[in-house]
Image: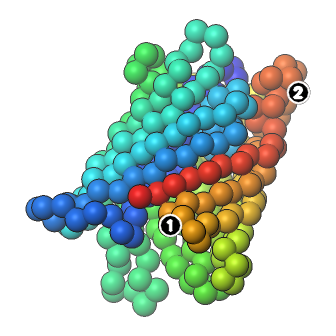
Amino acid sequence: MLKKLFAVTTLATMSGAVFAADAPALPFGLSFSGSAAVTTDYRFRGVTQTENDPAVQAGFTLAHASGLYFGLWGSNVNFGSGTPSLELDPSLGYATTLEAFSSKPTLDVGVVYYNYPSATDLSWVELYGKLGFKSVIAEGDSILTNLNYTNDYAGVDADSWNVNVGYSVPFGSSGFGGVAAVGYTVVDEDKYTFNDGDDNYVDWKVGLSYGFKSIPGASAELAAVGTNIDTDGLSDVAARAVDTGAVFTLTKTF
């Protein structure tokens, strides 16, 4: 059961790559941006995708001035012996600023394909919608809300909903900041359950971030990430996959 849980937990904490503020200008209203990262543990919705081992990740976005964009994101994965070693996720979406509202939130809607090239039976498609808000509680902070739906969770033809709320805030001009997020996932229990027969679980993240002033676009994050999935009866390896653990990540956007 946990291997199946591993197989479904692929990233898209942010489906679609990061839009860089200084993305190079291209003809026809196009712009290009991307990111690269190394992390001590690839976690998706609280669950490890690499058996708690490190991962190297990269992604890019090709966007049009109309708001349409295409993204591609990849990472190494490890769900155990005989499972895929690569995840490669294309996404297609539309992002815009809602100018009619005084807070001018950003709206981002689209579709992402969680793709394992060497094991397509584990691949699945998810629809997503996001609303982002800036300077809500403190100057420079941001709130991002996600709503995600699929009718093929983990490739087993099961309906699933996920909702997530994330918050980040800078600590003045120090370069340091705080990050926090909480998510909830529920799956059709007739077709899929997590450990102990549960059809839902909660995941969370709390940590600190740092932006390197000498290297534009470079940042570091140290966070505690975990879930409330019941670990009774699981092996030590399986329990560590969903238990709270420390994750350190270095990211460079361009």
Q: Decide: few, some or many residues near mark 2? Use Cα within 10 Å; few <14, some 14-19, many ≥20.
A: few
Q: Is residue 67 left or right of residue 105?
A: left
Residue 218 is drawn in which quadrant? bottom right
Tell me what residue is drawn at x 60 percent, y 57 percent.
164
Can the viewer see residue 248 in this picture? yes
> Depth check: 4 or 161 in front?
4
Q: Is residue 80 left or right of residue 196?
A: left
Foreground tag (2 vs 1):
1
Outermost residue to the top: 82
Label 2, label 1: how many angstroms apart (C-alpha)?
Answer: 45 Å
Say if 177 sits above or below 26 in the image. below
Give x and y (percent) for residue 47: 68, 37
| Res 103 label | none
**Residue, disc 1:** 216
Q: Quadrant of the C terminus?
A: bottom left
**Residue, disc 2:** 232
Give x and y (percent) for residue 4: 62, 22
Tell me what residue is drawn at x 63 percent, y 21 percent.
79
**Which amino acid, by three-letter code, is at mark 1?**
Pro
Give x and y (percent) for residue 10: 54, 36
> Depth check: 17 or 251 in front?
251
Give x and y (percent) for residue 160: 53, 40
Say if 55 sits above or below 93 in the image. above
Q: Decide: few, some or many residues near mark 1? Use Cα within 10 Å; few <14, some 14-19, many ≥20.
A: few
Can the viewer see residue 129 in this picture? no
Q: Quadrant of the N terminus?
A: top right
Per the image, label 2 sits on a secondary structure element best described as: loop
